[in-house]
Image (cartoon, helix red, strand yellow):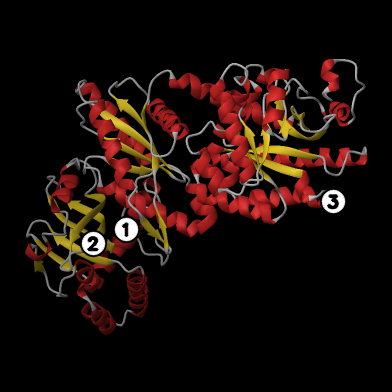
Amino acid sequence: MFASDTVITDTFGISKYLALLVLFILLLGVRLIDAIKARGDREALNSLKRYRRALEGANEGVFEWDLVEGRILASERAFEIVGLLYNDAWQALEDWSAVIPEAEIRRIASQQPVDTASSTPFRLSTSFIDKRGETIHLQWQGSVEVSDDGNEISAIGSISDISEQKNLEMKLAHDAMHDFLTGLPNRSLLIDRIYRVLKRLIRKPDATAAILFIDIDNFKTINDNLGHGAGDALLISLAERLRGHVRSSDTVARVGGDEFVLLLEDLRDEEQAQSFADRLSSSVRAPVDIHGHTVIPSVSTGICMVNDSSTSVETLLGDADIAMHTAKNEGRGKVVVFESNMRVHARKRLEVEIALHKAIENQELFLVFQPIFDIQAKPGYAVGAEALLRWQGASQQDIAPSELLAHAEENGMIEQIGNWVIHSAARQLAAWRTEGYPESFYVNVNLTANHFENETIIQTILNALDPAGLPRNSLRIEIVESALIKNPEKALRVINVLQSQGILVSIDDFGTGFSSLSYLHRFPFDALKIDRSFVMDIAQSKASRDIVTAIIIMAHRLGIKVVAEGIETESQLRFLQSAGCEYGQGYLMAKPVEPSGVTAFLKPAPAVTEEIELGYVT
């Protein structure tokens, strides 16, 4: 209230010294006001009344503390603020000892030089626990009067309850360092605690800690199918599980949408960290009820050991993140410890992601088509073609075509690129129709597991076909076994809907997985494609011939058409024809070509060579 010894004039034209007098009047109550009334000093009376109303309106209490006698005189509001019964007489300090900052005020007074003015301003904040057990925050401000010989005489000033303001400040400070949804520490607080661990390593070089970077598997599926409210409920549930598995000295933080980080301190070694992560991964799999749905969550975990004080926080978190993505690529529920060579792959992954974005912007992606032939017909015609993605440009010189979709899937761009492929293939089909291609001519498009995680792929296909007036069976879907393994129930649901819309579905690379036969029985495929690895060994291996024959017989009994991939020799072709395989593709008949090159395989060629007699153009 009083910041200096300079005479200060307030709103009502009262000097600092008169203000001090007003404080006394507030403390002594109506008695002095009555005395002024008796004296008839109406102007002074009105001025004092106005000042008293101003102070009371400010919701502050006022006090005078006699430092010599050890007693205090305070206003009714001051008593109310500190939770004591009001008494308008001088009080001993016993009842006020828990709240008044005696030591601090005496310290301030002791710093006042003897040869200066006779008062020292002060402004202090204190807190105490009231009778209800609640923390009350107080602010004291005023002046300490000092005698000529430097001894404290008295303190006079105001007292305010700033608990609401203080609690708001503490809440804002807490919210700035904690996640709103889960209440866990956020990235900022996590970084602060990792810094603390690194500083401790300077003092204790043998200490060991670990950072566990955790990502929820298939979290997007839950959000897409059950709604964001269900996703939030799962995050809250997992936050509680993670918090329940760590010690009080450890930190569990939420650093992103479905990402958590654990900071484990005072570990023995890496083995202890990995053992903990394995146990945590197992316990997380316990079923949880989310809005009436039973969800069995799993997490992918990357571990980075903290044992070098010179390592930056950003590097540690980055390495743990790299290990987590490595775990995610290996499958659900995996735990991976960071190794330095992982940085090379992560850097390559980032470079490819950036290059893929540029490739889409610069239209460097394009489709080629490998014709699919009816190998039982004489002569053989191309009845369809498989759309194959290619990337033209110097930026992709180190990426093989077979790796392109894998890179896109790893970088989270597979849906965007897959949608582009579907629409591009449909546009090409429409263009071929205008050129007189047979209405039965179709194009196969490869989809990955990610496409079957999101049922919007169905509408994407329909949106590509219907506006162009294309038959639903003119764009056919190929799916590899790994897409079925990831989420069989979801894949089956998508396949059933696709077929109900007239879109045909094939299983690609059949025979290479452990569950191929069970999937063939369970899923309603229209066609299967025998993997090229079996076709390649037909001439040399009786076992391969027997396997191919068995696949063809089994597929036909289930009403499924068969396509053989990778046909490169006449002997392979003749065997497949004799075994009853209906369709084939491979370099013997045609390599992948640009759209304009497909036309040549729609017309029979003149009989000139032995190959031409079979009805194929080379």
Q: 135 or 203, which is in the foreground?
A: 203
- Please tell me whether mark 1 sits on a helix, a strand or a loop: helix
Q: Residue at x 83, y 16 (%)?
A: 610
Q: 163 or 559, which is in the foreground?
A: 559
Tell me: residue 30, above or below residue 497: below
Badge 1 or badge 2: first in the primary sequence: 2
Q: Label 3, on which residue?
A: 469
Location of residue 42 in the rendering, given as x and y in whole percent from the top left corner: 35, 80
- Please tell me whether mark 2 sits on a helix, a strand or a loop: strand
Q: Is residue 88 left or right of residue 235?
A: left
Q: Is residue 99 left or right of residue 8?
A: left
Q: 207 or 67, which is in the foreground?
A: 207
Mark in front: 3 vs 2: 3
Location of residue 514 in the rendering, given as x and y in whole percent from the top left corner: 47, 35
Q: Residue at x 30, y 50 (%)?
A: 241
Location of residue 226 in the rendering, given as x and y in whole percent from the top left corner: 50, 58
Number of the label disc, if any, that sits on residue 571: none
Q: Is residue 429 left or right of residue 198?
A: right
